[in-house]
């Protein structure tokens, strides 16, 4: 199975525990999180709407909520994507192992997670 994920969603999935913008979003995020843990799942990386965004009530056209919010999200994506090749199709389990080794301290995610509205509930961030 194949997934397309934004850069920052790699971190979001690590800390996801059932919160979301809507019931539909939360159900979709739960399903994407299940799929990314499955063998034979591949992930292509992007800095635009992905398989998680598709169920987000804040997605308007190809933008998240408004231009300012979208710019912030694209910046977060860019910080994560600096470490990866967006032309590569990654094995999901190996990719998330690599995420663990690269983003392993609060300092390593300070430009990504600190201003996130979910960081006080995010298990990934809280456990760093």
Image (cartoon, rainbow, N blue to C red):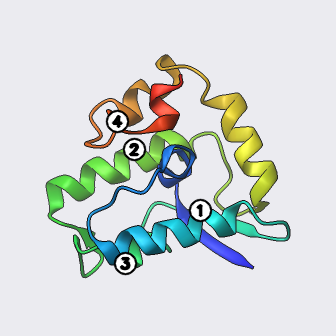
* Residue 44 visible from this viewpoint: no
Q: Which residue is rendered at x = 67% and y = 39% of the image?
A: 99
Identify the mark nearer the N-term, 4 or 2.
Answer: 2
Quadrant the N terminus occupies: bottom right
Identify the mark nearer the N-term, 1 or 2.
Answer: 1
Dot 1: element: helix
Q: In this view, does 3 lie to the left or right of 74?
A: right
Q: Residue furthest right?
A: 40
Q: Tell me the CA gap for discs 4 and 1.
A: 18 Å
Query: Viewer-proximal residue, 25 or 47?
Result: 25
Dot 4: element: loop
Q: In this view, does 128 lie to the left or right of 43?
A: left
Q: Where is residue 35 in the image (x, y as percent from the top left)?
A: 67, 69
Q: In which quarter of the image is residue 116?
A: top left
Please tell me the numbered disc located at residue 112: none
Dot 2: element: helix
Q: Where is residue 88 in the image (x, y as percent from the top left)?
A: 74, 62
* Residue 88 visible from this viewpoint: yes
Residue 87 vs 77, above or below: the answer is below
Q: Position of residue 5 (x, y in %)?
A: 55, 64
- State the residue position of label 2: 76
- State the residue position of label 1: 33
- State the residue position of label 4: 119
Identify the mark nearer the N-term, 3 or 4.
Answer: 3
Q: Tell me the CA gap for discs 3 and 4.
A: 21 Å
- Check contact, mark 2 vs mark 3: CB within 8 A: no
Q: How many numbered marks, from 0 up?
A: 4
- State the residue position of label 3: 55
Query: Viewer-proximal residue, 61 or 36?
Result: 36
């Amino acid at each position: 199975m194949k997934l397309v994920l934004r850069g920052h969603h790699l971190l979001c999935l690590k800390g996801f525990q059932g919160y979301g913008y809507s019931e539909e979003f939360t159900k979709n995020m739960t399903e994407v999180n299940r799929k990314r843990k499955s063998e034979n799942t591949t992930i292509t990386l992007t800095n635009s709407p992905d398989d998680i965004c598709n169920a987000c009530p804040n997605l308007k056209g190809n933008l998240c909520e408004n231009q300012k919010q979208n710019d912030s999200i694209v910046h977060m994506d860019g910080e994560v994507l600096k470490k990866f090749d967006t032309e590569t199709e990654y094995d999901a389990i190996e990719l998330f192992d690599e995420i663990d080794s690269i983003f392993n301290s609060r300092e390593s995610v300070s430009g990504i997670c600190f201003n996130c509205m979910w960081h006080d509930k995010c298990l990934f961030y809280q456990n760093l």
